[in-house]
Image (tube, rainbow, N blue to C red):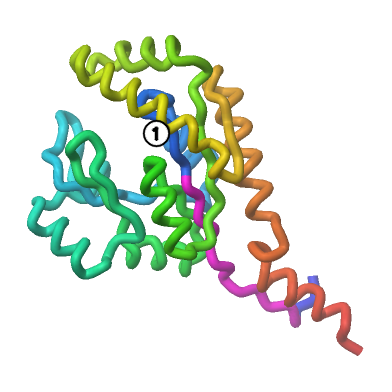
Amino acid sequence: MDSKTRFSVRKGSLFVVSAPSGTGKTSLVERLVELMPNMVESRSYTARSPRPGETNGVDYNFVNRETFESMISRDQFLEWADVFGNLYGTSKADTEEKLASGLDVALVIDVNGARQVRQSGANATSIFILPPSPSILESRLRGRSQNSNQEIQERLKVAREEVKAFNEYDYVVINDEFDAALGRLKDIVSGCCARVPDARPDVDNIVATFELK
């Protein structure tokens, strides 16, 4: 390649991934990040207590409710939501810092959070993960052994509303089989990162070398 060609750090791409609780979105995105070295998963802030095995600064940024509400009042969240009584939010500053460094960022957030991201005007590609059927979703929720029967029924009720929002997203992936769904998700991310707006400024620099006399 011509020694005069100079590459700049491209700004990373933002991806929003949503799905009903129990669909497998977290596992899919965690595996996707392992396969794509330029991608990181956004670490949310939450006002809930850590669950067994969770570590502050690794799984979530755990803060008390007063701190979380203060961050809301200071408009420090790109999006935030009350999910089954627990507060979760995505830091604007953390997200912009990662994108500016050239990293692609995946936000695993609910439907309402995704709507907030769109309303903010952020340039994001949105992906909805759809469970194959209500019965399979219920089976997956029960298989986690994390929730009571009442909580499972509540999640299924919310899921029936969330799946109606699929047409608000750019892409839909059906998680019928994990590896197949992962492959589809990876194809979407790879394709989006190759779009002309996302490939600049490197493409502009290369094209400019063809214009040199």
Check residue 12 for magenta coloring. yes
Residue shown at 72% from the left, 63% from the top: 196
The quadrant of the image that shows the C terminus is bottom right
How many other residues sit within 10 Å of disc 1, few (<14), some (14-19) or many (≥20)?
A: some
Check residue 24 for magenta coloring. no
Q: Secondary structure at mark 1?
A: helix
Residue shown at 39% from the left, 26% from the top: 159
For badge 1, the amino acid type reads: Thr
Please give the residue where the numbered disc 1 appears in the rendered image: 26
Front-most of residues 176 and 27: 176
Q: Is residue 52 above or below residue 187?
A: above
Look at the magenta stretch and give its main secondary structure: loop
Front-most of residues 199 and 47: 47
Residue 47: x and y in percent read 15, 47
- Horizontal arrangement in the rendering, residue 104 relative to residue 82 (left or right): right
Residue 68: x and y in percent read 16, 56
- Horizontal arrangement in the rendering, residue 141 relative to residue 180 (left or right): left
Q: Quadrant of residue 67?
A: bottom left
Farthest residue to the bottom: give it.
213
Q: Is residue 187 above or below residue 209?
A: above
Q: Is residue 66 above or below residue 209?
A: above
Which region of the structure is painted magenta?
4-16
